[in-house]
Amino acid sequence: MLTILFDGLAYGMLLFVLACGLSVTLGLMNFINLAHGAFAMAGGYCTVIVVNRLGVPFALGLPIAFLVTAIIGGLFERTLYVHVYAKPHLDQVLFTIGLVFMAVAATDYVMGSSQQFVQIPEALQGQFNVFGIGMGKYRLLIIVICGLLTIALQLMLTKTRFGSRLRAAVDDQRVARGLGINVGAVFAVTFAFGSGLAGLGGALGAEILGLDPTFPLKYMIYFLIVVTVGGTSSITGPFLASILLGIGDVAGKYYVPKLGAFAIYAIMIVVLLWRPQGLFARSTAR
Amino acid sequence: MPLADDVSAYLKQRARWSPLEIAFWIFAFATIWLFPGKYLIMKDTAILALFALSLDLILGYAGILSLGQAAFFGIAGYFSGLVAKYGIINEPVVALILGGLVAAALGFVTSFLVLRGSDLTRLMVTLGVSLMLYEVANRYSDITGGADGLQGVTVAPIFGLFRFDLYGHNGYVYCLIVLFVCFVIVRRIVYSPFGLSLRAVKGNALRAAAVGIPVKWRLVAIYTIAAGFAGIAGALLTQTTAFCSLDVFSLDRSADLLLVLIIGGTGYLYGGLIGAVIYRFLQDWISTLTPQYWQFWIGLVLVVIVLVGRDRIGAANEAVRNTIYRLCTRLMPRPAALRGAAPDGT
Amino acid sequence: MAILETIGLEKRFGGIVAARDVSLAVEKGARHALIGPNGAGKTTVINLLTGVLKPTAGRIMLDGRDITALDPHQRVRLGMARTFQINQLFLDLTPLETIGLAVSERLGSGGDWWRLVGSKTAVTDEIVEIVERFRLADVMHERTAILPYGKQRLLEIALAFACRPHVLLLDEPAAGVPEAERHELLATIAALPAEVTVLLIEHDMDLVFSFADRISVLVNGSLFVDGAPEDVARDPRVKAVYLGEEADA
């Protein structure tokens, strides 16, 4: 049972790293970016190419995935997304679905449709056996990296000037602009960073989640669940939501395999019925 | 009172079938004899048109953003397939109507989820419901056939007389008639006081409540009705192809539907129909060019449409419609008091 | 007999008290004005009366019936309608459709999905009567979004009136109306039938004193003064609140 908790924790933290960029984007610009999963996929494939084919060590492959995806994210933001911010939600949904379709088809064309695996170094394969709990070494690495990232993110948000500008802009964009905060720049940097994180998550998660061209479509719903349940006004909301969903999904699939992912969707619907603003959002409506 | 007569005549005229509409349907039925080799693609188009009409009801008239119409499409699809396969109901028309009712029941139950929260919440919940159904259908593959689809469905002849033949002739006529009947019903709804109240709710829900409209119940009602029509479309697909598979619940289907409505325009009833025709022929054309990467081009079309501007496309769409309408009115003069009334009530 | 009454009405938003112990009685057939400085809570009171906001304490009685727990659309059915300070109209509908909608709803055809709008003569006759009363006949086929502001304001009131309320709540009806269109608006308000009770929020003192037969003054969420216009005008406390200092009579 504890192994399930451990696995669920790893899964949940991975989901968090993947989804937090989406949460901030939604909270900041009220923009529904369904293509977020495509950035994760890009990071995954980037690492596959760099580690498997170019022989770069795994430890370097992860930051490279982050950087490459962040740059791609920044470029897309400045050239494409910026035209769509002011449009109604339906348009944003259509736009990002269109991007996802293009990304999926393009990846299929370039990389083929079979699942790809990252070559994980020897040291990370296998398990530790602690008090009878089988802790996969790779999963342990995920927990450690994601945990550190979460702490770093929280510190950055609360202790740095950029962080306070970001929080101000999320809270009330107009007032933030009125105070002289360059909301456009804040958003560009945040979007790039969020995409980079997604890419990192994709690279880390290739082993656990499975990397193939349909990744963005398969996992989009998970990211959206994290964001809707966790709310968009903090880091802790999506974090707790991710953990809840990670453990819920793993436990659900183990104990009631007949229903599979059904449990997650049911949880999401129940939560949204109870609190339409998300489990951890502020009570004031946006 | 001359003004009263004017108003009364105007309101009645508003709902009258315009010559353009009549011509549209005459042509639609004429296709049965005009294009005998194309029954299958035309049948697909008719089903897609009905499906799009159901989404137009909630999106174009009530303003509900939904990615989950596929849930209702699929549940009725499986229902009608299963009752045909196991011989529970042997008359297709009965199965069709019951399938619609099953979908409407699901719509009613899930409508309460759609009332609360923001646009994103609605998107999530509607998508979540159809993905849940996908999972359920996948898991219970011993009943549904899982990824392989529902096999061994044999559909009895309609009224015991009209067998579903290989060329698709009877299937197409069946779909076209069902589409027309459903369209007439939807048209009545839209021009009724209920339909008007929906447009008010979409325009300004706060004021609608302040005028005495029970907003919540109207939305529940239209969501349920739209689900029913989506279900009828799904049942039609299963009955005419004797097959039903998991992709009836997929995101692809809901996304394609949105695209159809964007192309055709929302809020004037014919958007779904025209959009379906354009979409289907677009799909056919692109598939012959690049059979495998169809999804890429659809994605590109979506991105371009949004960047160009949906309102510009809608305006262009409306301009084309108005030009055609003006050309037709030149041929048939109307009384001066009714000037300014377009056939779709705008 | 008071047709609309509030008893100890209170509304808190967290630590802020927007309305405090408001006990207001509006007589049947009255022309009652609610005035007060900006931020006094006048619109909050209207929102509480119509059900847009739920009170933290107190009760609201309409025609002797406790309506505190009812939804907004239910209160409309019982005979209370309002206008909004900033126009809340259906921009894509025409005035004819807008008024037709309200009349249909009231006459019970709102849920009717089979009949066509306009098939009942009772409805069309009433639409015409309202359109003429509110001087909208010349614009009734235009989309609301393109109407001049004065006409929109008239439509705003016409829409509330189409609900045939016993009590009509007007939230700053003259606000933002250009000088040229004011006269039409004020004349229309003055011509409202005597059986309709009107509660008016206004800043325009000329309108208030020419229209009202009773005035309540709201300050910082509490009822300050309540009485006949002459008494309120003479009250030194009211002058102090509005002018911030002792003023000569």
Image (spheres, coloured by chain):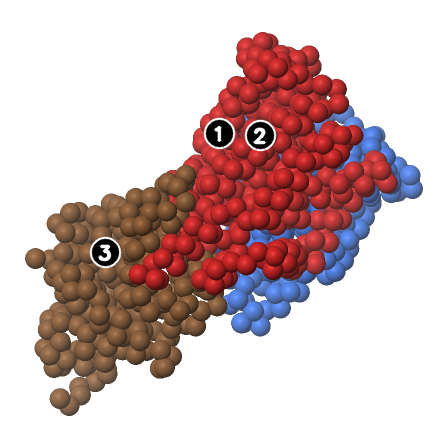
Chain colours: A blue, B red, C brown
What's under tag 1, amino acid-wise? Ala
Q: Chain of mark 3?
A: C
Q: Residue at x 27, y 71 (%)?
A: C188
Do marks 2 and 1 share a subunit? yes
What residue appears at the point 45 percent right and 58 percent down from the top-left corner?
Answer: C93
- Foreground: C184 or A196? C184
Label 2 with label 3: CB-CB less than 8 Å:
no
Q: Nearer the viewer, mark 2 or mark 1?
A: 2
> Can residue C19 be seen in the rendering of this structure?
no
Q: Which mark is residue B104?
A: 1
Q: State the SS at label 3.
A: loop
Question: Label for residue A107?
Answer: none
Is the C-beta separation of discs 2 and 1 under 8 Å? no
x, y (%) of residue B92?
58, 18
Q: Are marks 1 and 3 on the same chain?
A: no
Report the chain holding disc 2: B
The amino acid beneath tag 3 is: Pro
Give the distance between the C-alpha atoms of the residues marked 2 and 1, in whole angstroms.
Answer: 17 Å
How many neighbours does mark 3 have within 10 angstroms: few (below 14), some (14-19), or many (20 or more)? many
Position of B314 with respect to C32 (left or right) is right
Which residue type carries mark 2? Val
Image coordinates of residue B140 in percent, x first then y, are 61, 16
**In the depicted view, which residue is nearer to us: B102 or A154?**
B102
**Camera-side residue: C204 or B173?**
B173
Task: Give the answer, above or below, for where B288 lies relative to A94.
Answer: above
State the mark number for residue B178: 2
Residue placed at 28% from the left, 47% from the top?
Answer: C107
The one of A127 and C145 positioned closer to us in this rendering: C145
Q: Residue at label 3?
A: C165
